[in-house]
Amino acid sequence: MPPEPAEPTTRSNAVFDQLRADLLAGRLAPGSKLKLAVLGKRCTASLSVVREALSRLAEQGLVVAHPQRGFSVVALSPEDLADLTATRIDLETLAARRSVERGDLAWETALVAAHHMLAGTPAATPEGEVNEEWITAHRAFHEALIAGCGSRRLQGMTSALRDSAELYRIWSESLTHDHARDIAGEHSTLLSLAIGRDADGLADALAAHIQQTTDVLLRYAAHIGTGGA
């Protein structure tokens, strides 16, 4: 059988973007099997293009590639989430403390700029989808918060852990629909404590900020685990 003709790169990127948006919005359930034929029909794309998109998503940690068995959405693991959160809090609060102690005026200026960008970026698109620009701004703010710590290794470890937690963080909003939380207010508090050089206050607020995201998702996991909708 001759190979399928190559589809334009723009089409491949469009399928990748569509599937990524579905994952981030929670339309593809955690742990669910991803069937190439179903997704191909849904995206109006060939199996090779869908497979390529899923491989790219696997590289980002959004799906899991199973040898000889295809792909599935990353599972929502309460045990993994709890362990990831505890480790993040340990390292990220350490980095934040050191940034307060060692950060200079350039660090403060970059942090204020990062917060300004985050505060001015809508968390959702007009269609109610996850706003990729907000995700980027959110990451930049948290990276700026610890950028004054003086340790590239510590920054690298905290960034890697934050990347691992990103899908969980997005699910805490898209799956649980917890709209009562004032995330923007939490970010403003983190900025004020950092600029005010309150190391203890910043560490406590940052730990609570990270933990609250986890707690919301853990309550959701416990709910669906007992047969809730």
Image (cartoon, rainbow, N blue to C red):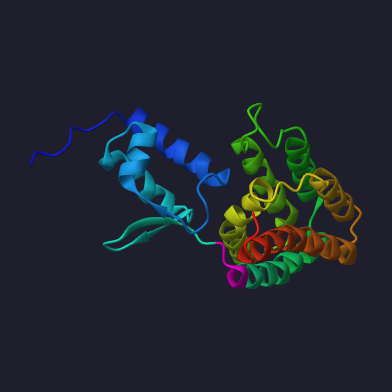
Residue at the limit of the structure toward the front, as seen here: 227
Q: Residue at coordinates 22% horizontally, 33% vertically from top-left?
A: 6
Give the percent coordinates (x, y) of residue 12. 35, 34
Answer above or below: position of 61 versus 207: above
Answer above or below: position of 117 versus 108: above
Give the percent coordinates (x, y) of residue 139. 65, 48
Between 160 and 144, the residue placed more toward the observer is: 160
Residue 147 visible? The answer is: yes
Compared across the picture, whether 15 is left or right of 116 comes to left
Query: Is residue 111 rendered magenta in the image?
Result: no
How many marks on residues? 0
Q: Residue at coordinates 74% horizontally, 63% vertically from top-left?
A: 215
Between 50 and 132, the residue placed more toward the observer is: 50
Majority secondary structure of the magenta segment? helix
Between 217 and 11, the residue placed more toward the observer is: 217
Compared across the picture, whether 78 is left or right of 54 comes to right
Query: Which range of residues does the magenta coloring cover?
Result: 76-80
Residue 13 visible? The answer is: no
Q: Residue at coordinates 63% horizontally, 60% vertically from top-left?
A: 224
Give the percent coordinates (x, y) of residue 164. 56, 60
Q: Residue at coordinates 38% horizontally, 48% vertically from top-left?
A: 54
Quadrant in which the C terminus appears: bottom right
